[in-house]
Amino acid sequence: MLIHVVLAFALFETLALSGVLLVWADRVNGARLLAAFLTGISIWITGNELPNWFGPGAEHAMMLLLATAPLTSSFFFHFCTVFCRVDIGRIGITCAYALGAGASLAAMVFTPGYIVEHRDIGWLAVAGPVGFAASMAWVVLGIAGVCVLLTALARARRPAFSQIAAVTASCLWGMLCLTGYGIAVLDLPVYPFPLLGLPFYPLILVYGILRYGVFVANAWARRALVWALLLALGAAIVALTPLLPIESRWVGGLAVAASCLALNGPVRQFAERLIYPGGEVSVADLGNWRRVLQSAETPQALALQASALLSERIGTQVEVRVGDPLPASHGVPRLVCSRDDGSESEGEGWSAVLEGWEAAPPGLRQVAELFGTVVSDSAARVEQLQQSAARERERQLQARLAELGSLAATVAHDIRNPLNIIAMAVAGAPSETRREVADQVARISHLTRDLLDYAKPWKLATTQLDIAALVRACAMRLPDVSLGAGLERELMVNADARRVEQALTNLFENARTAVDAGASGEANLARQDKDSRVHIDAETVDRTLLLHVCDNGPGVPAEIRERLFEPFASRSAGGTGLGLAIVARIMNAHGGSVALGARPPWRTCFTLSFPLTP
């Protein structure tokens, strides 16, 4: 009776594990083939038990079900080749299926054997000549599959070694369990106890594979082990209750309940260590990680410290990324901590994911996942620090701009009258003198206006703006300008039209001045109409609008590239040095940026970055 209960449980378990494999078929090579093999095992178990369920009249159906065993072995052999990545070619696989299907078909057409009654198993199938030949087919296929596993095991590295070793161990366990039927067929005076271990065969097989590919499988295994140990403990206590001086079911039940409650914690800890070797993380570990990462003030520093901590803990190099989209190093596992797209709260919404950890044992993966939660908390703290620092810098900048604005207003007022007196004083001078004085007075006036505009506080009045239309309108005022294909379509952004036009005008004037300077410095002035020109184009990259303003002037001197967008840095002799600084301030106010780049064949290219309207 016990054997039939065990076989029924094995049948249910095998079908359930087949479904689990199909759910996670993308995690394991050959998972569908393994599910087909386990389904064949369940058919074989059903065939053996059919006469015991419905009587000897089910013998014919029993033989038909048992005849599928060679085809089941074909699935096993195919799975071994796919799982171990052993290429035997299409012909080899075809021959294996031809052997299994041919043997199964022959066993279904001809009588493969007969049934006898056994004292421990009940009705038992005994192979005849056809059944023996079919049995040889599935034995050959099974041995061939095991040879593939052993060959791959000899040259495999972890985790493939551990997975192949688990499959090989499960095969050996399955062979040991089948000796129980051998004991019954040979009618040996021994109880066929090996059959009692059959439920462990598919469990070892599937868990050994999923252990390294599906982390939740380890959580299930831990819970199952805890329950199994507690049930075994309860059974042992029940067996020992007759030794108590008081005979009472209530006392026995109370003893079982008290023992299970008392030992629940130690049993769980034991299961944790068995399923997650090396995965114990104490409160002291978490506190130490938080204390070390507390000193990081930037995402880069946090990533470096976290990488050093985790690499030291697990004994291998681990790359940690904090809000960094750069590609991973080849072959190096990494922990990526990033902000969730749907979270807008400051300091919240950070999470960590593991990439390239398929080779790690479950214990180390658990350490990495717990470490990831600490890194996420630290990333939220760093984000808060950076945002607080940015607000403080903005406050200080506004204070400095207010002081500069007050000074600029005073200077502009005090300098206007002297400029007018100078202009009137040279009224009777020669024309060349008057022209030179007028140019210098205009330059000082331009500098004063730029200084006032840069220094005064202002707020954006944003609306939905078509950047392409604005660029086309501004470009009409400039000679020798070409527009790229990116400006032929509508490009909507949320921006202040007046300020964006001001930034574009500053860039256009900057480019035109540079082109004129480059042309005047060359002997062949005809080149001005042909090569010295301004080109404007646009493109969208990752929800960002990039507007390129390029020119073929002399370029930007290397000595001012680093401070090009700071006040009073100019690439032209007559410039005020505030035009690009104003552009940078306008773009920062819009949540964008301006950068000096390169777009051959143009010598100089400024790129404005606008966040696109969702």
Image (tube, rainbow, N blue to C red):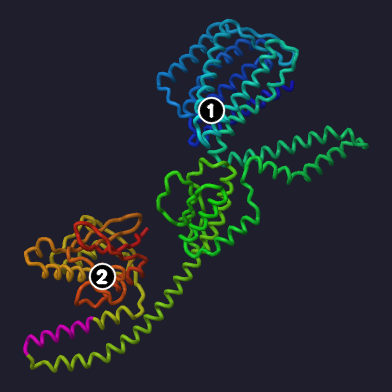
| Span of residues in magenta | 430-446
Provide the residue designation for mark 1. Answer: 35
Under circle 2, the secondary element is: helix
What type is the residue that disc 2 sits on? Glu
Residue 495 figure quarter: bottom left
Pick the residue in front: 395 or 430.
Answer: 430
Query: Residue, x 22% and y 81% (percent of image)?
Result: 446
Q: Is residue 439 a member of the stretch shown in magenta?
A: yes
Tag 1, which secondary structure?
helix
Please state, as top left, top right, bottom left or bottom right, where the C terminus lies in the image: bottom left
582 lies above or below 94: below
Q: From what the image shows, is residue 364 above or below residue 285?
A: above
Residue 501 numbered tag: 2
Of the 4 image quadrants, the one containing the N terminus is top right
- Horizontal and vertical percent position of residue 86: 45, 26
Residue 176 left/right relative to 332 = right
**Marks 1 and 2 close (CB-CB < 8 Å):** no
> In screen coordinates, is 394 left or right of 14?
left
Hey, which quadrant is residue 37 in on the image? top right
Q: Is residue 390 magenta?
A: no
Q: As shown in the figure, which amino acid type bears the numbered disc 1?
A: Ala
Q: Residues within 10 Å of mark 2 (few under 14, many from 20)?
A: some
At horizontal 33% and vertical 80% (from top left) the residue drawn is 455
**Residue 352 at x, y = what percent?**
51, 52
Expressed as whole percent of the image width and height from the top left, the position of residue 492 reads: 30, 61
**Closer to the N terminus: mark 1 or mark 2?**
1
Q: Judge left or right: residue 487 versus residue 157.
A: left
- Main secondary structure type of the part rendered in magenta: helix
